Amino acid sequence: QVQLVESGGGLVQAGDSLRLACAASGRTFSNYYMVWFRQAPGKERELVAGIGRNTIDYADSVKGRFTISRDNALNMVYLQMNSLKPEDTAVYYCAAATHRGASYDYWGQGTQVTISS
């Protein structure tokens, strides 16, 4: 079992930065493929970024602006978001899968990110 808790969301202006954090429980955290999703009102959920043992993936919409990282010693995953745009406004969720391409069995409760223009 893995429990995930996100933090770091908020209201900022376009061009600003935010850093989201996801705290995970579980002794085998380092084995999981960890991702950040986001969902804006009226839109489909979007996979933003993912990180495994040796892989990092980004959606085209965030490449060059967002950076995903993890600290296995602390059971943490981070999403550094720079040059934020109003279209980045969404609820951001942390999720975990046993490996890249597997179903996401564990989800956090989400954290709201709002970017004003």
Image (spheres, rainbow, N blue to C red):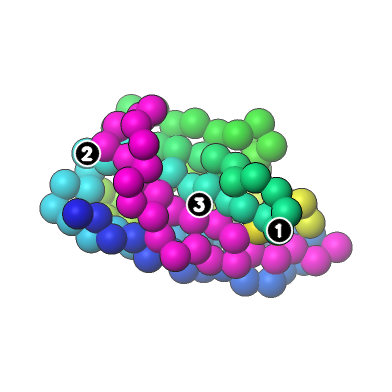
Q: Which residue is mark 3?
A: 79
Q: Looking at the image, which is closer to me, 90 or 14?
A: 90
Residue 16 lies in what quarter of the image?
Answer: bottom right
Q: CA distance from mark 1 to mark 2?
A: 32 Å
- Residue type of the residue flagged with mark 2: Asn
Q: Which residues are magenta?
A: 91-117
Q: In the structure shown, which secondary structural element does the residue marked by tag 2 occupy?
A: helix
Q: Residue at x 38, y 28 (%)?
A: 101
The nearer-to-camera label among 2 and 3 is: 2
Which dot marks residue 31? Answer: 2
Indicate whether residue 105 is drawn in magenta: yes
- Mark 2 packing: few (<14 Cα in 10 Å), some, or many (20+)? some
Q: Report the number of discs.
A: 3
Q: Secondary structure at mark 3?
A: strand
Distance between the alpha carbons at the discs numbered 2 and 3? 19 Å
Kindly check if marks 1 and 2 are in contact, taking CB atoms under 8 A apart as contact: no
Residue named by callout 1: 41
Looking at the image, which residue sits at the far bottom?
11
Quadrant for the N terminus, please.
bottom left
